[in-house]
Image: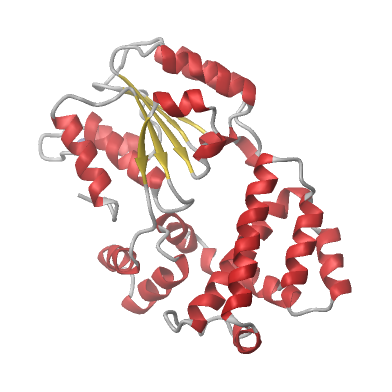
Amino acid sequence: MNVVGHKKQWNFLKDRFEQGQLSHAYLFAGPSEVGKKKFALDFIKLINCIGEKCKGKGTCKNCKMVEGLSHPDLLMVEAKDNSEIQISQIRQVQQFLSLKPYYSSFKVVLIDEAEKMNQEAQSCFLKTLEEPKGNTILILISSKPETLLTTIFSRCQVIKFFNISRKEIQDYFIEKGLPTKQAETIASISEGKLGRAIKLLDKDGLEKEKEALNEIIKVCGSDIASKFQYVKNLPEESFSKSLSIIKRYLRHLLFLKLQINDLSYLSEVSDKFKTMSIIKINRALKLTEKIDFQILTTNASQKLALEILLLEI
Ligand SMILES: [Zn+2]
């Protein structure tokens, strides 16, 4: 099986499937980019596989269509252009579920970043959850499940995900044919997040990550006026991205301090590393978590929050 990490979750669901006891709705909850979506697609392959030899391994026609998101019995819902998931998209879900499966045993709806459903969409989705139809399975994926309506939460079986080990990621990429050294680097930067690792390998993902980190390192090392200028020039849609890069940067610093990571690819980290104490890094990290939560749950000013954070670093 090509599932990477998350073995407990996999065995649990596989067992339910084999017993014919799958739930109508699942919530895959856990940190972002740990491979929840890949896991969900592997699971959908398993339950809708038609190849006798394939057994969900991805070689049959059905599995290939799931992989390419072109399977007629699979509907993937996601926020377009990083905005919200709208009620119109949930109406499409209802329309999709009203038809019988074409090729497979199950009709499956996958909602990625389910927390991005706006209030209207969530209320509408609740109705779908309340009236399960035949062989349909709804899978919600979320790294912020606490922001979903509790009524949605309580109607889904929650499967929790966690970061996976660096070694599991490394082995996965070596098996895929990546040179050992590169697999090591990717595993090291991705911090147990398979989704991120896959993105890093995508086109010039690694270069982009280095660029983004180096830019943040430069900002963090600059004077107050430059920090304010950086925040002022930052487009609103880039705030959360910037915040997560800062978070990654701080984690890299922490790993360096604790000597559990070799990040020699980031030349400028070393200077900052010498001056920042573990306590200070930890404090800044906690602050990023707090800001992340505040931005999501209140109308807190993102600009102000980011300024405060940059002053801390
Ligand atoms: Zn198959």
Residue at image point 66% right, 37% down: 83
Identify the image quadrant of residue 70. Answer: top left
Residue at image point 30% right, 17% down: 102
How many discs mark residues in the rendered view?
0
Q: Quick check: 186 above or below 299? A: below
Tell me where residue 15 appears, x and y as whole percent: 16, 36
Q: Quick check: 209 above or below 120? A: below
Image side of residue 183 versus residue 273, left or right: left
Image side of residue 28 versus residue 207, left or right: left
Q: Quick check: 177 above or below 26? A: below
**Is any atom of residue 96 visible in this view?**
no
Tell me where residue 9 appears, x and y as whole percent: 27, 44
Tell me where residue 60 appears, x and y as whole percent: 21, 37
Q: Quick check: 253 above or below 131? A: below
**Is any atom of residue 131 visible in this view?**
yes
Tell me where residue 310 appears, x and y as whole percent: 75, 68
Residue at image point 65% right, 87% down: 275
Identify the image quadrant of residue 308. Answer: bottom right
Residue at image point 45% right, 63% down: 201
Please say which color scheme the image uses.
secondary structure
Quarter of the image with the C terminus is bottom right
Q: Quadrant of ligand 1?
A: top left
Between 49 and 118, the residue placed more toward the observer is: 118
Between 68 and 146, the residue placed more toward the observer is: 146
Between 176 and 260, the residue placed more toward the observer is: 260
